[in-house]
């Protein structure tokens, strides 16, 4: 399942930021962060238990259907009203949605939101999408050069590709080697002879905060 | 003439061209640049100025190029895609040309994970092939990447790198062809130690006729010791054959530097015989003073003189 992959911050870091707060609400999310085992019900209870061990007595918990959808936020209102501080174990979207809703409450991120990726095997998640806003996977045989090449080269591989590995680390696969092999297997190496022009990064984060508006969905 | 640079004129006149390299210092002083330029003045035809190589902050390649020019040496400024977006790259090309610089080598750039600022962001708004095209568009089409016209265009002689030792091997010549199609005028290769592989690559280059469309210079790195050679072989995209390493190891203590020079000279002599090779690029970083001896022993002195067209005018 493709998803936002996140990883919990260290308890030490979370505790440092909670200094001075009495009642704390740890809020999880049932979507991506549940799947990647960073902010679901189990992880929420684990963090709550760890905080209690560190001397925080007023810790309560809840898990929302989705923190990234305002429709589901009211379910948290009652507990949020009782808390001095909310630790969100959702991705950065959830943290912000809670901060926007609970203007009088201090909302802290409990996770580091890492990337768009998926599980390769139990306990291993890998990045596959950088949300560049204009997919070019048709040019590169379904291997993303933007996110999997360390230099986001559109005309790779660079001179640092050796034995299928990237120059930055022998553990990192060279995306362009993968692209080459894939296109070779498909008999489409001809695609690599064509120079790919500079990307229009205005569709990416570089163009400012992005918004998708769908009138067809709005009308329903 | 595309740029009229000394380098371009030497190639046009059919000379076997010899270039050197200077790494600018990690300081605001130009003294070491001028000293190294003076060492190289009569030994090579032009000198590369590296652009924050291995992602370590150094005096800028453009500023270094101006210091080298002041020593009467032809500069080739290196320009990487790591640190600047297309706005800054075009701006620097305008500035470099206005300062009298006429040659630019377009590179992707080492990843910043290697350098002393691993916490920095990289840019890679364009890649090396797109950068070549960008420089050519400015020169030949007189237009910026936006499509707008450039009133006084920077007329740069365009260089690019090629690494016959990186993988996948069969793709390396395709990549060269892409660089040539994008507008590369000359090529400097990664350091050659594996002569057999370089010859195989040149064979593929000739099969495609690329040697007639671009001036290919073989890269030479003289090494001071067996340890240095071993380390070089560990760099991604570098190949050092075991026999060569054994030969360096076999040299008696105190004679390894001499053996390193011998190897460099022999490599130049061999590379020069390969059809389609139009020059050598000697990268003796922190060993610049040895370049004149290497060039002399390789039979490449004196360097050709050109009828001066006067100092390169500043626009």
Image (cartoon, coloured by chain):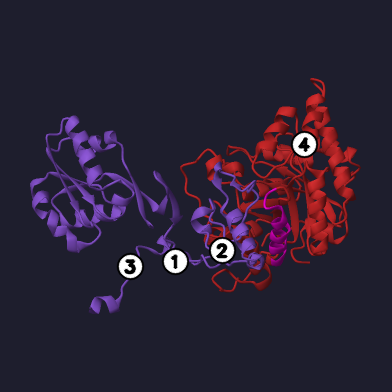
**Which percent across, then down, holds residue A153?**
57, 57
Q: Give the vertical position of B266 relative to B225 (above or below).
A: below
CB under 8 Å between discs 3 and 1: no
Q: Residues within 10 Å of mark 4 (few under 14, many from 20)?
A: many
Same chain, labels 2 and 3? yes
- Tag 1 residue: A202
**How far across and down, in percent of the image, does residue B10 sit?**
84, 57
Measure the C-alpha gap from mark 2 to mark 1: 21 Å
Crowdedness near tag 2: few (<14), some (14–19) or many (≥20) residues, C-alpha within 10 Å: many
Residue B89 visible in the displayed image: yes
Question: Tag 2, which secondary structure?
Answer: loop
Query: Same chain for marks 4 and 1?
Result: no
Position of residue B118 in the picture relative to residue A219 (left or right)? right
For mark 4, give the secondary structure. loop
B171 part of magenta stretch: yes
Q: Which residue is mark 2?
A: A140
Which region of the structure is painted magenta? B166-181
- For label 3, the SS is loop
Q: Nearer the viewer, mark 2 or mark 3?
A: 2
Label number found at residue A211:
3
Mark 2–mark 3 distance (CA, rounded to whole Å): 27 Å
Q: Nearer the viewer, mark 3 or mark 1?
A: 3
Cα gap from disc 3 to disc 4, whole angstroms: 55 Å
Residue bearing mark 4? B222
Q: Chain of mark 1?
A: A
- Quick check: B24 left or right of B248? left
Give the residue at x 43% y 63%.
A204
The answer to whether residue B44 shows anywhere in this view is no
Q: Quadrant of residue B145?
A: bottom right
């Amino acid at each position: 399942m493709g998803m936002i992959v996140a990883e919990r911050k260290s308890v030490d870091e979370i505790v440092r930021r909670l200094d001075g707060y009495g009642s704390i609400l740890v809020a999880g999310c049932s979507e991506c962060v549940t799947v990647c085992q960073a902010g679901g019900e189990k992880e929420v209870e684990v963090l709550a238990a760890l905080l209690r061990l560190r001397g925080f007595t007023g810790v309560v918990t809840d898990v929302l259907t989705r923190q990234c959808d305002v429709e589901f936020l009211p379910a948290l209102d009652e507990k949020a009203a009782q808390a001095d501080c909310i630790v969100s174990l959702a991705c950065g979207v959830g943290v912000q949605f809670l901060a926007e809703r609970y203007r009088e409450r201090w909302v802290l991120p409990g996770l580091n939101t890492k990337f768009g990726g998926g599980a390769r095997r139990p306990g291993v998640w890998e990045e596959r999408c950088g949300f560049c806003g204009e997919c070019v996977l048709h040019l590169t045989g379904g291997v993303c050069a933007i996110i999997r090449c360390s230099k986001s080269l559109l005309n790779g591989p660079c001179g640092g590709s050796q034995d299928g590995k990237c120059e930055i680390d022998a553990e990192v696969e060279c995306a362009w080697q993968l692209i080459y092999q894939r296109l070779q297997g498909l008999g489409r190496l001809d695609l690599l002879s064509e120079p790919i022009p500079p990307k229009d990064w205005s569709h990416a984060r570089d163009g400012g905060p992005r918004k998708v508006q769908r009138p067809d969905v709005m009308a329903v | 003439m595309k740029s009229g640079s000394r380098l371009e004129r030497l190639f046009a006149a059919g000379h076997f061209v010899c270039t050197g390299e200077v790494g600018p210092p990690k300081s605001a002083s130009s003294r070491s640049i001028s000293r190294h330029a003076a060492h190289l003045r009569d030994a090579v035809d032009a000198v590369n100025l590296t652009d924050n190589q291995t992602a370590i902050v150094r005096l800028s390649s453009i500023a270094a190029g101006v210091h080298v020019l002041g020593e009467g040496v032809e500069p080739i400024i290196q320009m990487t895609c790591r640190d600047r977006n297309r706005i800054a790259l075009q701006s620097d090309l305008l500035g470099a040309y206005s300062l009298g610089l006429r040659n630019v080598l377009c590179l992707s750039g080492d990843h910043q994970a290697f350098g002393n600022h691993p916490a920095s962001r990289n840019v890679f708004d364009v890649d090396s092939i797109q950068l070549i095209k960008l420089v050519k568009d400015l020169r030949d089409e007189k237009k910026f990447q936006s499509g707008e016209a450039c009133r006084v265009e920077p007329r740069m002689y365009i260089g690019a790198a090629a690494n016959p030792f990186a993988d996948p091997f069969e793709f390396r010549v395709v990549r060269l062809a892409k660089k040539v199609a994008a507008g590369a005028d000359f090529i400097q290769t990664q350091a050659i130690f594996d002569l057999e592989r370089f010859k195989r690559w040149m064979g593929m280059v000739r099969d495609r006729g690329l040697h007639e469309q671009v001036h290919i210079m073989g890269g030479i790195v003289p090494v001071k010791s067996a340890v240095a050679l071993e380390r070089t072989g560990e760099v991604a995209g570098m190949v050092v054959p075991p026999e060569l390493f054994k030969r360096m190891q076999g040299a008696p203590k105190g004679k390894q530097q001499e053996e390193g020079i011998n190897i460099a000279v022999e490599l130049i002599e061999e590379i020069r015989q390969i059809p389609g090779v139009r020059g050598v690029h000697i990268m003796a970083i922190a060993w610049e003073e040895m370049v004149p001896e290497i060039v002399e022993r390789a039979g490449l002195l004196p360097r050709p003189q050109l009828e001066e067209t006067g100092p390169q005018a500043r626009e």
